[in-house]
Image: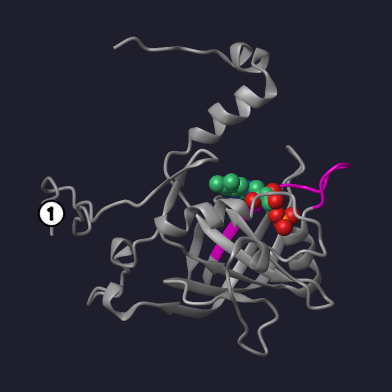
Amino acid sequence: MKTISLTGEDLAELSSERRALLINSLPGYKPAMLVGTASGDGDSNLAIISSHFHLGSRPPLLAMILRPDTGNSERHTLRNILDTGHWTLNGFTLSQASKAHHTSASFPKSVSEFGACGFCESWRPPFKAPFVESAPLAAGCLLREHQPLRINGTHLIIGEVVHLDFLEVAQRPDGALVLDQMALAAVSGLDTYTAPGAGVSYPPASIDSTPQPR
Ligand SMILES: Cc1cc2nc3c(=O)[nH]c(=O)nc-3n(C[C@H](O)[C@H](O)[C@H](O)COP(=O)(O)O)c2cc1C
């Protein structure tokens, strides 16, 4: 099979749309989560975000990268998180991918993607952000650190997990979650959704032997 090799200069010469689609595919399969927030006035918002990563377990920290406001686009999720300090992460299944993808459209601030895209809000007072009702995996996060990144103006948002819901059948005896038991969708690039299977899992690696499946 033929391989394509590109230099940094080749990448710089691509149209911005083509470059964005190519570079967005590079991190491989990514977590697809719906981020629920509310404005200070209580207006709810839901947006699909795929840049989540684990930062630490003690305290339990998850981070994500949010794009900045630009002249022609508002970033409601970013603004709401900076205003309230609260957000929810909600997994979804492949059968909900169309509705989840719809949340990435530029709805005006006055329109909640919950209603517009067909998701139901679930509030757990005093938490100041809405959860997606019946999400197979849901976490509530509190803002612990915010870093605008000098390199391209995006925002690193770090949250502590203070609430967690998941299907009981999806937890292994050692505590890990078996994500395929919850039929969680993942995403490739910005447009292709998939539901990974069980895969193969290994015990912690040691230098003495090749890992054998559990
Ligand atoms: C699959 C997918 C993944 C996305 N991941 C991110 C992301 O990691 N960070 C981000 O800022 N926007 C991401 N977006 C774009 C947002 O969903 C989009 O800008 C949305 O309109 C934001 O809504 P808001 O203004 O209500 O926050 C993604 C879009 C799609 C389709």
> How many numbered circles does the render carry?
1
Residue shown at the point (54%, 51%) measured from the top left: 50
Residue 124 point in image, percent of width and height: 61, 87
Q: Using the image, determine if residue 17 lies above or below residue 146.
A: above
Residue shown at the point (10%, 47%) measured from the top left: 209
Q: Using the image, determine if residue 166 lies above or below residue 93.
A: below
Residue 109 point in image, percent of width and height: 81, 61
Q: Quadrant of the C terminus?
A: bottom left
Depth check: 113 or 180 in front? 113
Depth check: 27 or 131 in front? 131
Amino acid type at image mark 1: Pro
Q: Is residue 205 left or right of residue 106?
A: left
Query: Image quarter for residue 76?
Result: bottom right
Depth check: 201 or 165 in front? 165
* Residue with the mark numbered 1: 213
Q: Using the image, determine if residue 191 lies above or below residue 125.
A: above
| Chief secondary structure of the magenta portion | loop
